[in-house]
Image: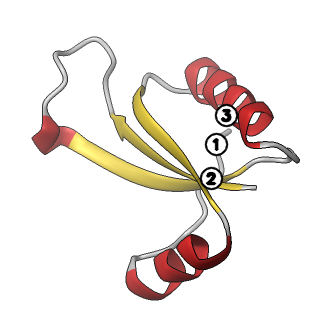
């Protein structure tokens, strides 16, 4: 399942809309809730990002992002 994640690069600073970025991440999950939980835990354990919003992309939404955005899957290590 692929998610579009909106985030701030530093969770220790005050959030500002101008500092919001997005990334696409693939998670091995079959349900949206399961994927959201796994992805949030992964990002929180591996980065210092402040997660603002996560959106599961399927069907037409995923195709739209691939065609109209700089679509590149991010691997979080």
Per the image, label 3 sits on a secondary structure element best described as helix
Q: Any mark on residue 44, and which?
A: none
- On the image, the x and y values in percent for residue 40 come to 61, 27
Give the quarter of the image for residue 68. Answer: bottom left
Do the residues under discs 1 and 2 have CB atoms within 8 angstroms?
A: yes
Q: Which residue is mark 2?
A: 25
Q: Which residue is mark 3?
A: 36
- How many angstroms separate mark 3 from mark 2 (CA)? 11 Å
The answer to whether 26 appears left or right of 56 in the picture is right
Q: Which residue is mark 1?
A: 76
Q: Earlier in the sequence, mark 3 or mark 2?
A: 2
Residue drawn at point x = 65 percent, y = 51 percent? 75
- Which residue is outermost to the front? 60
Do the residues under discs 3 and 2 have CB atoms within 8 angstroms?
A: no
- Callout 1 crowding tier (Cα within 10 Å): few <14, some 14–19, many ≥20: few
- On the image, the x and y values in percent for residue 58 come to 67, 66
- On the image, the x and y values in percent for residue 31 come to 82, 43
Q: Earlier in the sequence, mark 1 or mark 3?
A: 3
């Amino acid at each position: 399942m692929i998610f579009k994640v909106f985030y701030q690069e530093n969770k220790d600073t005050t959030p500002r809309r101008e500092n919001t970025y997005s990334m696409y991440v693939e998670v091995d999950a079959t349900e949206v809730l399961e994927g959201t939980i796994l992805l949030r835990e992964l990002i929180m354990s591996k980065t210092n990002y402040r997660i603002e919003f996560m959106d599961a992309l399927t069907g037409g939404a995923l195709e739209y992002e691939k065609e109209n955005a700089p679509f590149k899957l991010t691997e979080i290590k």
